[in-house]
């Protein structure tokens, strides 16, 4: 299987997430970071080519997980990364559901 360039692998990851009920919410000006949420929810999954810093994590508590792709990946690898991101997203969402004050404001 041929590896996709990082930007194409991120695009595939976004399409796969959209196929699982996520919708695009926002992106940065450079276009290398996208934020997606399930319809009707404020919690986000982040797809990017770089990890967040500790300061970024502290500021954006509404991002439950990040899917970082900065190297070429095969479509199968992207599918595996998306599955892991969705598993982590759902686990963190359940964990925060036990903390009523953790609910982000609707955007």
Image: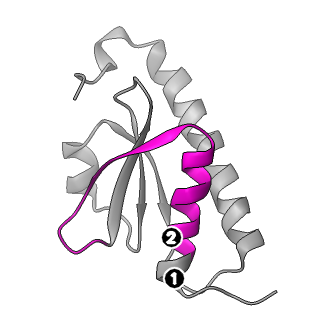
In this image, 87 relative to 7: left or right? right
The image position of residue 102, as x and y in percent, is: 32, 20
**Mark 1 near mark 2, Cβ–Cβ under 8 Å?**
yes
- Local crowd size for mark 2, using a 10 Å CA cut-off: few (<14), some (14–19), many (≥20): many
SS of the residue at dot 1?
A: helix
Identify the residue at horizontal 61%, vertical 43% (top origin): 86
- Local crowd size for mark 1, using a 10 Å CA cut-off: few (<14), some (14–19), many (≥20): some
Whether 36 is among the magenta residues is: no
In this image, 3 relative to 41: left or right? right
Residue indicated by mark 1: 6
The answer to whether any part of residue 56 appears in the image is: yes
Question: Residue 42: which quarter of the image?
Answer: top left
SS of the residue at dot 2?
A: helix
Identify the residue at horizontal 56%, vertical 37% (top origin): 21
In this image, 96 relative to 61: left or right? right
In this image, 78 relative to 54: left or right? right
Residue indicated by mark 2: 10
The image position of residue 39, as x and y in percent, is: 44, 29
- Front residue of 20/78: it is 20
Q: Which residues are magenta?
A: 9-31
Q: Is residue 66 above or below residue 96?
A: below
């Amino acid at each position: 299987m041929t590896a996709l360039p990082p930007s194409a692998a991120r695009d595939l990851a976004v399409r796969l997430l959209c196929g699982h009920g996520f919708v695009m919410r926002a992106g940065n000006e450079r276009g290398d970071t996208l934020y997606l949420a399930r319809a009707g929810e404020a919690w986000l999954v982040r797809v990017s080519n770089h990890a967040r810093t500790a300061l970024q994590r502290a500021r954006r508590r509404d991002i439950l997980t990040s899917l970082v792709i900065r190297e070429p990946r095969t479509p199968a690898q992207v599918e595996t990364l998306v599955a892991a991101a969705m598993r982590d997203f759902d686990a963190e969402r359940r964990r925060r559901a036990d903390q009523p004050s953790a609910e982000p404001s609707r955007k």
